[in-house]
């Protein structure tokens, strides 16, 4: 079964690499593009082609059913269609169908195990589907991105609550989590009719979720551990800080539609929060998907540190109206993700050599 998962992972990583190139074009690097719609495909490729396919694949592995891999396949192919430029409309259709498939997977999961965290993760899948459907129907990207943010924030928050079961959280603490999630979700819904106000309410929700995770997530306790456990905790804890920062920027600036502030809000969350989560969970996710161990190495801190330093340069460039800082920060962001892939492959290969 593990070998059959490789094509899905390949499609996701291919979408990631294309999204990185598209992002560098969008941020001002005058490099060649193999097709004219590539810069516009940056968001769909990163969110749906890479992250959506990866999350759908992770859920399929957890369900351990052959039919559960269909959503990951559809979204992966949708990303492939977009990056090749064959058809913008068909690429977005496939990504929308793939997100609907993930929502159906969560429907089966809820039937098996109805909990707060499965409902929150299902709400994340629903947000991905709605965002893709809005984009397919012609909504501008800036009106769609909040739904994509909700997809990732709710998915990650639900997963953390699931893992925090070992702490036996009190009803009050779980109630605080539900309240923070409700505030964030209400802002996302409100953005359909009042984009600026919805963004600000969502920003409050992000701050509340970040505060909850910083206070109650098991990562706080694991900071005192050693080895892989500590690395995961450091990665997660740093990501929660970026979530709070993104929420503060959303609250302060509201519904910006483009430009440096828009860039700062999105990448504080998409890069600072989401990829810190990916870096932290990669030593667990990749072994589960590939069915092979991946030993921990202290060099994992290199891509985590590079992520935060490069993102500080980028966001600083955005907020200080310093185009060179933003542009070089974006390039270093891309190189950081390549470093992460390189460190991951090296760790897997070193295990094979043992």
Image (cartoon, rainbow, N blue to C red):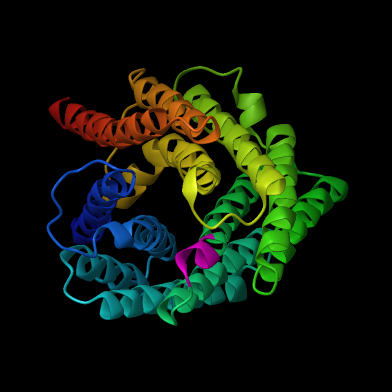
Quadrant in which residue 91 is drawn: bottom left
Q: Is residue 324 visible?
A: yes
Q: State which region is magenta.
A: 140-145
Q: Is residue 36 left or right of residue 113?
A: left
Q: Main secondary structure of the magenta part?
A: helix
Q: Quadrant of the N terminus?
A: bottom left
Horizontal and vertical percent position of residue 296? 35, 25
Q: Quadrant of residue 146?
A: bottom right
Left or right of 122: which side holds 290?
Answer: left
Q: Quadrant of the C terminus?
A: top left
* Residue for point 28% across, 46% down: 20
Instruction: Indicate whether residue 141 is drawn in magenta.
Output: yes
Viewer-proximal residue among 274 and 223 = 274
Q: Position of residue 113 (x, y in %)?
A: 62, 68
Q: Residue furthest right?
A: 172
Residue drawn at point x = 52 percent, y = 41 percent:
264
- Name the foreground residue: 18 vs 73: 18
Whether residue 298 is situated above or below residue 119 in the rendered picture: above
Say left or right for 292 vs 110.
left
Residue 277 in the image: above or below residue 202: above
Q: At 27% across and 80% down in the image, what residue appears?
A: 90
Residue at image position (52%, 22%) is 230
């Amino acid at each position: 079964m593990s070998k059959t998962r490789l094509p899905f992972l390949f499609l996701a990583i291919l979408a990631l690499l294309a999204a990185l190139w598209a992002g560098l074009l969008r941020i001002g690097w005058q490099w060649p593009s193999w097709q004219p719609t590539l810069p516009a495909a940056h968001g769909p490729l990163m969110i749906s082609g890479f992250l959506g396919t990866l999350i759908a694949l992770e859920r399929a592995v957890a369900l351990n059913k052959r039919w559960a891999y269909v959503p990951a396949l559809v979204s992966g192919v949708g990303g492939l269609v977009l990056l090749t430029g064959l058809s913008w409309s068909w690429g977005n259709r496939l990504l929308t169908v793939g997100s609907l498939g993930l929502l159906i997977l969560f429907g089966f999961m809820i039937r098996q195990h109805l909990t707060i965290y499965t409902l929150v993760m299902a709400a994340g899948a629903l947000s991905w589907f709605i965002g893709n459907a809005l984009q397919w129907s012609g909504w501008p990207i800036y009106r769609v991105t909040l739904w994509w943010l909700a997809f990732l924030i709710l998915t990650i928050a639900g997963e953390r609550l699931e893992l925090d079961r070992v702490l036996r959280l009190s009803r009050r603490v779980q109630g605080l989590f539900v309240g923070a999630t409700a505030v964030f979700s209400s802002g996302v819904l409100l953005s359909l009719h009042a984009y600026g106000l919805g963004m600000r309410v969502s920003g409050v929700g992000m701050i509340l979720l970040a505060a909850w995770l910083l206070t109650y997530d098991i990562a706080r306790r694991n900071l005192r551990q050693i080895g892989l456990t500590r690395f995961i905790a450091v990665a997660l804890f740093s990501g929660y800080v970026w979530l709070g920062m993104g929420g503060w920027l959303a609250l302060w600036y509201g519904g910006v539609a483009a430009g440096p502030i828009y860039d700062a809000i999105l990448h504080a969350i998409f890069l600072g929060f989401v990829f810190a989560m990916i870096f932290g969970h990669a030593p667990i996710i990749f072994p589960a998907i590939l069915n092979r161990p991946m030993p921990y190495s202290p060099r994992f801190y290199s891509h985590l540190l590079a992520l935060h330093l490069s993102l500080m340069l980028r966001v600083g460039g955005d907020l200080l109206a310093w185009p060179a800082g933003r542009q070089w920060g974006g390039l270093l962001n891309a190189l950081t993700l390549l470093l992460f892939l390189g460190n991951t492959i090296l760790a897997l290969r070193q295990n094979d050599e043992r």
